[in-house]
Image (tube, grey):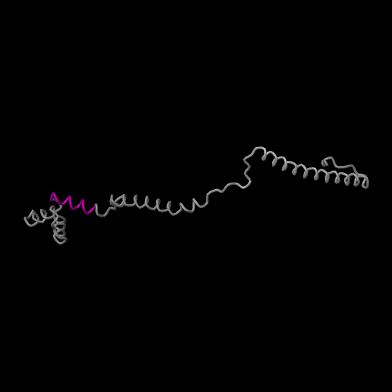
Amino acid sequence: MDSQIEQLLEKYWEGETSPEEEKKLKAYFKQYPEAPEAQYFRKIASDRSTLPDKPFIHPGRKIQRAWLSVAAAVLIGLISLPFVLQQRPKADPYAVSDPQEALEITRASLMMVSQGLNKGKSYTYELTKLDDAREVLVKEPRPKGRGY
């Protein structure tokens, strides 16, 4: 190996070479693949063509994203707080706290239901009268499937 290449290698390992000097090194190791450093340059060339499995993410950016997420959640909470507090459930206007009053209200409502049922019962009675009249006129017995 000639002294110029050795000097370039020293500069390369120190990180002080220019792109032109690196091209000279690559060209030299292409001509002489048996040189010990040639394997290193072949490996670099092959590794450059493959892509990494995951993209590189700087560790500081992850922490920054976490803080941004926390800040966004807090901000959304503060913005929505007045709307949530404004829609508090109001007291039920029909709520009864006295048990005696609740009993009276229940009795009154059951009486209303009973009156409605009795009214329906009277209509059913009228319908059976009409059905009996139809039987007399037609002289057909009532079908067994119907029950009035």
Figure label count: 0
Is 105 located above or below residue 32 in the figure? above
Nearest to the observer: residue 13 or residue 32: 13
Which of the 4 image quarters holds residue 98?
top right
Nearest to the observer: residue 36 or residue 146: 146
Location of residue 122 in the rendering, given as x and y in whole percent from the top left corner: 83, 44
Which residue is drawn at the image coordinates 15% and 62% (left, top)? Answer: 20
Q: Is residue 17 left or right of residue 92?
A: left
Location of residue 49 in the rendering, given as x and y in whole percent from the top left corner: 26, 55
Magenta highlight on residue 86: no
Location of residue 143 in the rendering, given as x and y in whole percent from the top left corner: 85, 42
Q: Which residues are magenta?
A: 35-46
Location of residue 139 in the rendering, given as x and y in whole percent from the top left corner: 93, 44
Which residue is drawn at the image coordinates 24% and 52% (left, top)? Answer: 47
Looking at the image, the residue that sits furthest to the bottom is 20
Which of the 4 image quarters holds residue 119?
top right
Which residue is drawn at the image coordinates 93% and 45% (left, top)? Answer: 136
Q: Is residue 62 left or right of residue 13?
A: right
Nearest to the observer: residue 141 or residue 9: 141
Q: Main secondary structure of the magenta part?
A: helix
Q: Is residue 70 left or right of residue 91?
A: left
Q: Is residue 129 left or right of residue 45?
A: right
Magenta highlight on residue 45: yes
Q: Quadrant of the C terminus?
A: top right
Nearest to the observer: residue 1 or residue 60: 60
